[in-house]
């Protein structure tokens, strides 16, 4: 991403598209999400849909919420947020129950299928444990997004489509009213950080393949949004500039507090050789003048390289909460 690609202003929807929230639980009919995008020609319909508006709205809202904030800062953490974090910790413990098996191929350890089978079996119960009883009618619908958030058990891969499914899960919680604007900061930092710890563990333990063409739609091999929100955290940081994040003393010292630097530290642990060669896209970002331009550019890039890519969004599932109906 060259500097001239990130400096132009981004047309952004209202930062709080949650004006559509919360759903009227007394009249709403929930249903199991299913695919709705079958051809590349469906992309314009998707980009005009309520689901696209709501997902991009929550992404931008969280981007604004985490601005200039550290993970360790003091902020509101609700019981629901705590329960989501505990749910992710419980799921991480399951990795110990399904250690990698001996197999000829290096990548795609089949033990992941056992981990994933447990998730599929328990996902609805996990969602109900997070939610107050008045929201339980939505549990089956939300459980589908939760299950989709951790990779594909057939291909044993993970990519930005799975990351998007987790955002969909969080967006649904917001639309229900189970998460409120008070929660946005904790969701963008504490929940995302815990999610990242889990998916990195899965990626490493089960040698998961990057979905798509080896990370072509992500900034490392797997992720995008922690870089986007992470750049917002750093917008006005006095010490950490874009040119600084490739320095080991910077990402080692600050990884616990900043999503972007946590991602860089993880890359340094799993890849060898010159950074400019194994992570060229990120190397280009380190040449951008300031974090505002980086953040702005990543929003544009996310729209173009993730949400507009048929190989990713063909797998997205639409239910009663995130619909393919045209946004008003």
Image (cartoon, helix red, strand yellow):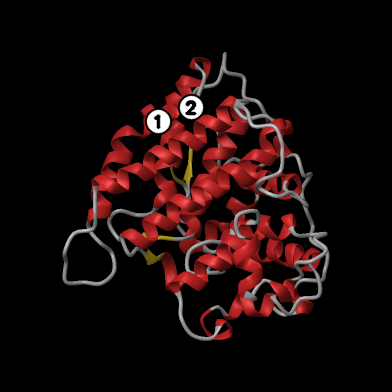
Which quadrant, please, contains the N terminus? Answer: bottom right
| Residue for point 62% across, 56% down | 259
In the depicted view, which residue is nearer to us: 137 or 89?
Answer: 89
Which quadrant, please, contains the C terminus? Answer: top right
| Residue for point 63% across, 63% down | 253
Mark 1–mark 2 contact, CB under 8 Å?
A: yes
Q: Find the distance from the CA under tag 1 to the CA under tag 2.
A: 7 Å
Query: Is 73 above or below relative to 9?
Result: above
- Residue 33 in view here: no
Query: Is 97 above or below relative to 103?
Result: above
Residue 130: which numbered mark, if any? 2
Residue 25 spot, x, y in % from top left: 57, 18
State left or right for residue 115 relative to residue 18: left
Residue hosting label 1: 126
- Residue 141 in view here: yes
Residue 174 spot, x, y in % from top left: 62, 32
């Amino acid at each position: 991403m060259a500097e001239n690609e990130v400096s132009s202003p981004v047309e952004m929807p209202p930062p709080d598209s949650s004006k559509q929230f919360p759903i009227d639980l007394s009249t709403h009919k929930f249903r199991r999400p299913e695919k709705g995008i079958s051809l590349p020609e469906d992309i314009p319909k998707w980009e005009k849909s309520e689901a696209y508006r709501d997902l991009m709205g929550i992404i931008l809202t969280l981007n604004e919420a985490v601005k200039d904030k550290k993970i360790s800062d003091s902020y509101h953490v609700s019981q629901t947020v705590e329960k989501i974090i505990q749910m992710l910790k419980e799921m991480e413990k399951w990795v110990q129950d399904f250690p990698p098996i001996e197999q000829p191929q290096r990548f795609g350890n089949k033990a992941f299928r056992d981990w994933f089978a447990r998730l599929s079996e328990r996902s609805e119960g996990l969602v109900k444990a997070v939610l107050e009883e008045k929201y339980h009618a939505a549990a089956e619908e939300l459980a589908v997004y939760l299950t989709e958030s951790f990779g594909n058990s057939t291909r044993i891969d993970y990519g930005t489509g799975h990351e998007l499914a987790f955002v969909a899960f969080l967006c649904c919680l917001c639309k229900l009213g189970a998460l409120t604007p008070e929660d946005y900061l904790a969701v963008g930092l504490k929940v995302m950080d815990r999610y990242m710890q889990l998916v990195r563990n899965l990626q490493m333990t089960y040698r998961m393949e990057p979905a798509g063409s080896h990370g072509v739609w992500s900034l490392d091999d797997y992720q995008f949004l922690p870089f986007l929100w992470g750049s917002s955290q750093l917008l006005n940081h006095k010490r950490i500039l874009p040119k600084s994040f490739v320095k080991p003393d910077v990402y080692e010292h600050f990884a616990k507090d900043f999503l972007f630097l946590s991602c860089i530290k993880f890359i340094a642990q799993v890849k060898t050789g010159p950074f400019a060669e194994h992570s060229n896209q990120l190397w280009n970002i380190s040449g951008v003048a300031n974090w505002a331009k980086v953040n702005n550019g990543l929003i544009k890039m996310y729209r173009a390289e993730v949400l507009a890519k048929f190989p990713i969004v063909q797998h997205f599932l639409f239910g009663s909460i995130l619909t393919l109906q045209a946004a008003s």
